[in-house]
Image (cartoon, coloured by chain):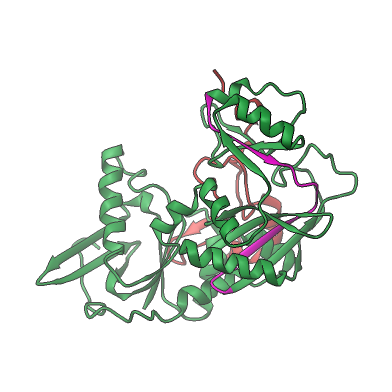
Amino acid sequence: MRPFALNYARPAQQLEVSVPYAYDSRLQLNVLPDGRLAAHDYAVLRELGSTTSTAGSKTHFDD
Amino acid sequence: MTVLILTCEQDVTADMVLAELDANGVPVVRLDPADLPGPVALSGEYVRGAFRGHLSVAGRLVSMGGLRSVWVRRPGAPATHAAEPSDWLTEESAQALYGMLRSTDARWMNDPDAARRARHKPWQLSLAQRCSLPVPATLITTFPQAARDFAVRFPDLVVKPVSGAHPQEPPRAVPTSRVAPDTDFAAVAFGPTLLQRRVAKRADIRLTCVGDRLYAARKTVAPDADPDEVDVRFAASDTPWHAVDTPSSVAAGVRAYLREAGLAFGAFDFAEDADGMWWFLECNQSGQFGFVQIETGQPIAAAVADWLAAPNPAGTQSNGSRSWAIEGH
C-alpha cells in the first residue's frame, strides 16, 4: 500500500548542525563569538549551508 | 513606520535583510509566532469603529497601525514554544496574530492567502501555462493505467512529490527521481503521483523575483554528471551559481505569474535544455535566496529590504502613532 513516490524516498539528511553563532535579541540578529554579524560572514554561511535551498526540511518545503 | 519580520531566530537569511534595513535606519521588529504567547505578546481592541493593536517582543513595543510591511519569512507555528502547547492554542494564537495583522494596511511579502494558494504545485503548473512559460508534460494521477499510458507517450519520466513535502515519520526525503522504463505503476493507486517528462538539462536556473526586480542565476550541469541525479538539491556538485540575464519572454512570464498569483516575492526553478529554453519547474513563494547572493553577488537582500521599506501607498492608519504600554513589558 506504499504510494508510488515513496519508492524513491531516501533517509533525510541530518539537518541539525551546530552553528557558531547565536541569536542576539537586542540586535535581532545572529552574532558570531567575536561579535561580528553571522550574515556578513559568507564563508561561515557557505560552509554551513545556512542559506541554501534544502530538501526534506521539517518545517518548510517551499524553499 | 516599522517593518515586521515573522521568522525563527536561526534564520540568517532574514539577518541579511535585517542588516540592510538597520543600515538604512528603517525600524524593524522581528519575532517568531512560535513564541506567542510568552516572549511575544499582543493586544488589540476594536472600539468606536476603529482598530488599535500592539505587539511586544524583547522589550520592543510596536503599534500595528505603524507597520509599513510584514515579511512572512520562516515563522514557526504560533504557540509551539508555549509552556503547554496544543493544537487549540496554536489555532487561537494564529487567529489572534494573523487576524490582527490583516486588520492593518501593511503590505505583505507574501500575503498569507496568496502564499497558501501558491504552494499548490498543480495550480503553479496551470498558472505557468497561462503565463506562457514552457511547462514539461506532466501527469498527476491515482490511475495506474493513466500512468502507464503517459509513460508510453513520454518514456523518459521523473517523479516528484505533488506537495513538495517530505515524510517525517521517519524523516525521509523524496527527491525528483528518474522513473525506469519498465517500472510497475500499480502503486500509483495508493497516492496521487506526479510524473513529468524529464528535461535533459544543461543547467539549473534559479530566478529570484522581488517585486519587479529579477535576479537569475545559472548552475551548469557537469558533462560527466550522473543523468539519474536530476534534483539539484541532492546532486553533489562544486559548480557555482553565476548571474545571467533573464530572457525577455521569461521575464514577461514570471511578472505575469507573480501579478496573477498576488505574490511580491517568488523564487522560480527552471531547467535549461540543450536549445537554451527555460522549462518551468516550480515557484517557491518563500524560496531561499541567501545562497544565490553569496555565490553571485546579486543584491537580493537589499532588494527585499527596499521593497519592505517602501512607502505604503495605502497610507498610515489614523491610529498608527498611538503610544501604549502593556503592564509587565
Does B124 appear above or below B157? below
Quarter of the image for residue B31 reads bottom left
> Which shade is chain A?
red
Residue at the extreme right: B224
- The mark tally for this picture is 0
**Residue B73: % across, % down:** 48, 58
Q: Is residue B293 visible?
A: yes
Does B113 appear above or below B143? below
Q: What chain is colored green? A: B
**Residue B65: % across, % down:** 28, 73
Give the side of residue B157 with respect to residue A39, left or right: right
Quarter of the image for residue B140 reads top right
Does B96 appear above or below B107? above
Give the side of residue B300 with respect to residue B242, left or right: left
**Quadrant of the drawing holding the C terminus of chain B:** bottom left
**Residue B317: % across, % down:** 26, 78
